[in-house]
Image (cartoon, helix red, strand yellow):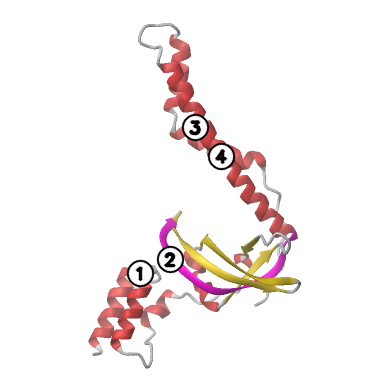
């Protein structure tokens, strides 16, 4: 598997990492700033004493959560930039991958186990929960993925952009007849694909009907 050259990415922005989550949390928790402003504006009016402390508490909580999320985003972006700038191209042999039945931003979160190896990179195995875009799923079946790795810290990431394109998986899974397998084995395999979210319900029903119709 070849690794295509890539442009050096721009370094992560501290402001760009922290500001979006902080603003998002303040918008979602806008009641905090509203109470804060109302508490200051109403001053010592009767029945308004609770507005200021509640407003301060909610606003501070929004800011703390936003800053924590921003720090995680910044650290992740720094790691990504470091690997894309100084990381060595290597290969990750796909040992196994399993569905976690979790989707993040409508993309599946998979449990991956890889064996990373390459020139000047001592082989080592890793296991990670990684979001794999639906369009990238067929790459897992090629057996190897391009990765970027720091040989000293063993930090790594899948270099999706350097992977060679492959044909979509789902149509082939749905229509390809598994030769020399009994109907029971084919049905069990189809059930496993459905559990792992590798075929849709419509593809599952259509393929199951074809298997049963051929008995």
Q: Nearer the viewer, residue 7 or 84?
A: 84
Residue that label 2 marks: 99
Neighbor class of circle 3 (other Cα within 10 Å; few <14, some 14-19, many 20+) is: many
Neighbor class of circle 4 (other Cα within 10 Å; few <14, some 14-19, many 20+) is: some
Label 1 to label 2, Cα distance in Å?
8 Å
Q: Which mark is residue 62?
A: 3
Which residue corresponds to the image point at 66% horizontal and 53% vertical from the top-left? 79
Residue 203: x, y in percent? 33, 74
Q: Earlier in the sequence, mark 1 or mark 2?
A: 2
Q: Which mark is residue 195?
A: 1
Q: Nearer the viewer, residue 2 or 48?
A: 48
Q: How many marks?
A: 4
Q: Earlier in the sequence, mark 3 or mark 2?
A: 3
Residue 7: x, y in percent? 72, 60
The quadrant in which the N terminus is found is bottom right
Q: Is residue 41 magenta?
A: no
Neighbor class of circle 1 (other Cα within 10 Å; few <14, some 14-19, many 20+) is: some
Q: Earlier in the sequence, mark 1 or mark 4?
A: 4
Label 2 sits on a secondary structure element that is strand
Instruction: Read off the magenta span.
Output: 86-103
Label 1 sits on a secondary structure element that is helix
Label 4 sits on a secondary structure element that is helix
Q: Earlier in the sequence, mark 1 or mark 3?
A: 3
Residue 17: x, y in percent? 61, 42
Neighbor class of circle 2 (other Cα within 10 Å; few <14, some 14-19, many 20+) is: some
Q: Earlier in the sequence, mark 4 or mark 3?
A: 3
């Amino acid at each position: 598997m070849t690794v295509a050259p890539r442009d050096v990415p721009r370094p992560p922005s501290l402001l760009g990492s922290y500001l979006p989550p902080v603003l998002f949390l303040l918008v979602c928790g806008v009641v905090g700033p509203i109470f804060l402003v109302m508490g200051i504006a109403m001053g010592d009016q009767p029945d308004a004493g609770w507005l200021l402390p509640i407003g301060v508490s909610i606003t501070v909580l929004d800011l703390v959560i936003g800053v924590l999320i921003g720090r995680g985003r910044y650290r992740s972006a720094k790691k990504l930039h470091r690997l894309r700038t100084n990381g060595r191209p290597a290969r990750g042999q796909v040992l196994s991958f399993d569905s976690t039945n979790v989707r993040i931003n409508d993309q599946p979160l998979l449990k991956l186990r890889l064996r990373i190896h390459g020139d000047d990179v001592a082989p080592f195995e890793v296991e990670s929960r990684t979001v794999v875009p639906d369009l990238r799923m067929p790459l897992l079946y090629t057996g190897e993925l391009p990765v970027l790795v720091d040989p000293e810290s063993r930090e790594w990431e899948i270099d999706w952009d350097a992977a060679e394109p492959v044909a979509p998986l789902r149509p082939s899974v749905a229509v390809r007849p598994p030769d020399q397998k009994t109907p029971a084995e084919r049905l069990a395999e189809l059930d496993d694909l459905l559990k792992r979210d590798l075929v849709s319900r419509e593809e599952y029903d259509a393929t199951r009907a074809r298997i049963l119709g051929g008995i």
